[in-house]
Image (spheres, helix red, strand yellow):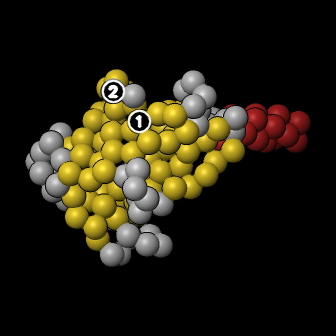
Amino acid sequence: MKPYGKQWMTAAALFSFAVFAQATPAGTGTQVEDGTGPEWIYKDCVKIEAGSGGSLHATNTRGAFIETEFSGTGIEIYAKKDAKCGTAEIYIDGNLIEQIDTSDAGNLWKSKVFGKDGLAPGKHKLKIVQTGSLGIKLDFIKVYSN
């Protein structure tokens, strides 16, 4: 039985490595807080002085958006997920990439709600648009570059 146990442990270790290796885009990460610089644009958003280590920007009406420029080859978006949060569309360089759902029965801070890698090196524009009746609560983004 011992060899079987070692084989299982080896397989589990390999599986864990594969899962964690794919969890973040390749390259060096830079955390960009929730947007205090002039490159951040907010429409129908409020700043909430709470959040996980700072503040959140919350959209409050369908069509509200958060927009910024970033330089890199990958991006991750982190937001709060709870019962009062809803859906949004993620655009990169004007192209719809994905629709996300930030609703959750719990009260989850710093939740990764979107990730995209393999972007061409250089500047990109990110836009997050509220699509449902409930808003989104952006915490921060991480930008990756090779």
Type of amino acid at the residue the image marks with label 1 = Lys
Residue under circle 2? Answer: 94
Residue 99 left/right relative to 59: right
Task: Specify whether residue 35 is in view.
Answer: yes
Question: The N terminus is located in which quarter?
Answer: top right
- Residue at position x 43%, y 59% from top? 37
Residue 54 left/right relative to 99: right
The answer to whether mark 2 and mark 1 are in CB contact below 8 A is yes
Distance from label 2 to label 1 (Cα)? 7 Å
- Residue at position x 41%, y 63% from top? 36
Expressed as whole percent of the image width and height from the top left, the position of residue 95 reads 34, 24
Mark found first going from the N terminus, 2 or 1: 2
- The answer to whether 68 is drawn above or below residue 80 in the figure is above
- The answer to whether 56 is drawn above or below residue 5 in the figure is below
Residue under circle 1? Answer: 125
Question: The C terminus is located in which quarter?
Answer: top right
- Of all residues, the one furthest to the bottom in this rendering is 49
Q: Quadrant of residue 97?
A: top left
Secondary structure under the numbered disc 1 in the rendered image: strand
Q: Quadrant of residue 44?
A: bottom left
Foreground residue, 123 or 24? 123
